[in-house]
Amino acid sequence: MLTALCLLLLGMLPAAAQTIEPVSPLPPEASPPAVAIVIDDLGYSNRIGGGFARMPYPLTLAILPDTPYARALATLGHRNGKQIIIHMPMQARGRPAVAPGGLRLDHGPFEIARRLVSAFGDVPYASGISNHEGSRLTESSVSMRLLMTTLRLQRVPLFLDSRTSARSVAATLAQRAGLRVAERDVFLDNSREPTRIHAQLDRLIRVADRRGTALAIGHPHPETLAALADRLPEFEARGIRLLTVDALIEIGNGQHAADTDAKARHGWFSDATD
């Protein structure tokens, strides 16, 4: 009897164990919102491109291949802690011609591979690609399958869909090919009016606050450079993390993946005409 009483007091009997209320774990602290800002169309101006490359923030620089300052800006950006990706020209709707080195609907696997090899030769330190224009090509399931398969075979780990078409299948097929995938949420400077750029930065913050992460694309305009120089210190003060695209994906950019999965579930193949 005495032994049983001692065990009961020590909580070792089942009857005693059933009376112990489990302690609820403390909820994990929510991670602060995070954003990535990509600067597209770099390579034609060393002056404005160098301004973005020298900014003391982890921007991602998307550099056009076969441009006069592609190599210099990639090298400068890499030395200053920027992620470098190739901004690959792709066929736009209504325009069969593409910029030098770009990809068209009539390109087969060998031509796609050749042009990618050339682009990576032009842009050192590149860790992935994004689409420059491409509103037509990114809608083509045939072309995007060829591109993503080629990227995987060439061990290119990242594809960023600039979302120049609402019917783009690029992110879905990149994800299925096993690539790291991100998609654009906000264009910063479709209007170069400074107040509009600031409004788009506010929108970027709202998306990140609501969803946890957000990705914006800007362009090499003096107004964009000035707006970022003015506003990015505020991001830090508000606890908003500014990351490269790779780092944004690494912390769990789940919404982008969820969005692409949803497109697949809703049968985008039925809209494909290629």
Image (tube, helix red, strand yellow):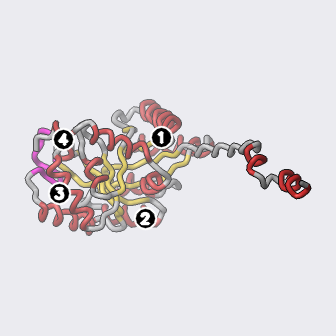
Mark with earlier residue (1, 2): 2
Q: Residue at x 46, y 66 (%)?
A: 79
Is there a contact, CB below 8 Å, between mark 3 and mark 1? no
Residue 102 magenta-highlighted: yes
Check residue 246 for magenta coloring. Answer: no
Residues packed near mark 3 inside 10 Å, few (<14), some (14 to 19) or many (20 plus): some
From the image, which quarter does the C terminus lie in?
A: top left
Q: CA distance from mark 3 to mark 4?
A: 16 Å
Point 88% across, 52% down: residue:
5
Mark 3 or mark 1, earlier in chain? 3
Q: Quadrant of residue 135?
A: top left
Name the amino acid type tagged 4.
Answer: Phe
Disc number at residue 269?
4
Q: Residues within 10 Å of mark 1 (few under 14, many from 20)?
A: some
Q: Nearer the viewer, residue 68 or 115?
A: 115
Q: Any mark on residue 227, and which?
A: 1
Q: Is residue 16 visible?
A: yes
Give whichever of 12, 71 is nearer the camera. Answer: 12
Q: Amino acid at mark 2?
A: His
Q: Work out which quarter of the rendered image holds the N terminus and state it.
A: bottom right
